[in-house]
Image (cartoon, helix red, strand yellow):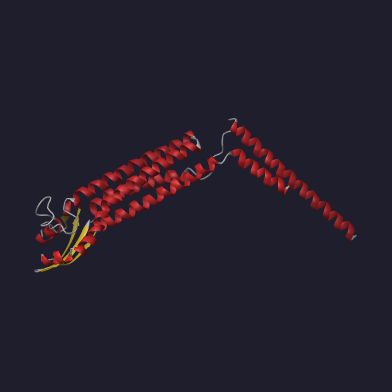
Amino acid sequence: MDYRENEAENEDFFLDVRKTRKKAKEDILDETFEKAEISKGLRPKKEEKGTKKPFLKLGIILIFIAVISIVIVINYLPWMFIKYDAEYGTIQEFYHRDFINEEDHYYEEIDDIFESPCTNCSNSSKNYIGLIKDDFTNIPKTTSYGFITLALLGIIFTIFGIFERIRNFSRELVTVIHSTFAAAAFIVSIIIALSTIKFLGSHFLLYYNKPFIEASGVNDVILIYPVPLILIVISFAIMIIASTIMKINFHEFEKKLVPEKKRSSVSNFKFGNKI
C-alpha cells in the first residue's frame, strides 16, 4: 500500500514538473512573439507603469515653489536683521528688499558698513563686509527673474505632461524632454544660489574686518539674512530633485544601450538551464 501511494505521489510530482516546464516554455514563446510584433510595429510598446504621473506633479510643484518664493519670500520677508552696539545704545533693525527697514529709521553707522565714500578705491573704502545697499535691490531682482524662469519651465513642463498622456509619445522622446527641463531647472537654481550666497560670505569679512568696524564706533555686530538663507535652501532642493530626474533618465538610456537581442538570449539561456 505504501509503495502504491509513493508511486502515485511521484507521478503527481513529475506531472507538476512537466506542467511547469510547459508553462515556462509557453511564456518564453509568448514573450518572444510579443517582442517580434513590437519590433515590426504590429503591436504598440507597453509603457512602464508609474513613469509619467510623477513628472506631471513635478511641474505643478515647481510652479508652486516659484510663486511662493516671489510673492512671499522675496517681497515680504526681511532680507537682513542687524544688531550692534553704538555710543547711544543697542540698535536692532529688520531690512527688506531695496534696503528698507520696518521702522523707516536712518543710521549713519550702517551706511559706514554698507556704503563706500568713494568709487574704485581700496585704501579708504569703508565697505567692510563685501555688500552694498544696491545689493538689496539688484539681487532680489536677479532671484525674482530666476524664479519667474522656473515658473515658466514648470508651466511648459506641465503642458508637455498633459500632451504626453494624450499623444502617447515614445519613451525615448519623453526621457530627452524630461532631462532637458531638469537640466534647465538645475542651471537656473545654480544662478539663484550663487547670487544669494554673497550674503553668507559677508560673515567671513565681518569677522576679518571686525577691528576696523569697531574702530568706527560699531561694536558686536550681528548679521542674519533670512531670505537669502531660505532661497539657498530652496535652490539646493530644486537642484537635488533635478539631478535625481537626470540620474533616472541616464539609467533609462543606459538600459537602451544594451542590445535587446543580447538580453533576450541571456534570459533564454537562463531559462534553458532551469528547464
The number of callouts visible is: 0
Where is residue 104 drawn, in percent x and y? 12, 57
Q: Is residue 250 visible?
A: yes
Furthest residue toward front:
123
Rendered view: 179 above or below 240: above
Residue 30 is left or right of residue 10, and the answer is left
* Residue at 62% over, 32% down: 37
Near-viewer residue (88 or 250): 250
Q: Quadrant of residue 8?
A: bottom right
Rendered view: 126 above or below 190: below
Residue 117 is left or right of residue 68, and the answer is left
* Residue at 21% over, 62% down: 223
* Residue at 17% over, 65% down: 210
Q: Quadrant of the N terminus?
A: bottom right
Near-viewer residue (94 or 139): 139
Where is residue 106 drawn, in percent x and y? 10, 58
Q: Is residue 90 visible?
A: no
* Residue at 50% over, 35% down: 170
Where is residue 112 drawn, in percent x and y? 11, 59
Q: Quadrant of residue 27?
A: top right
Furthest residue toward right:
1
Residue 137 is left or right of residue 6, and the answer is left
Where is residue 260 drawn, in percent x and y? 59, 39
Residue 93 is left or right of residue 263, and the answer is left
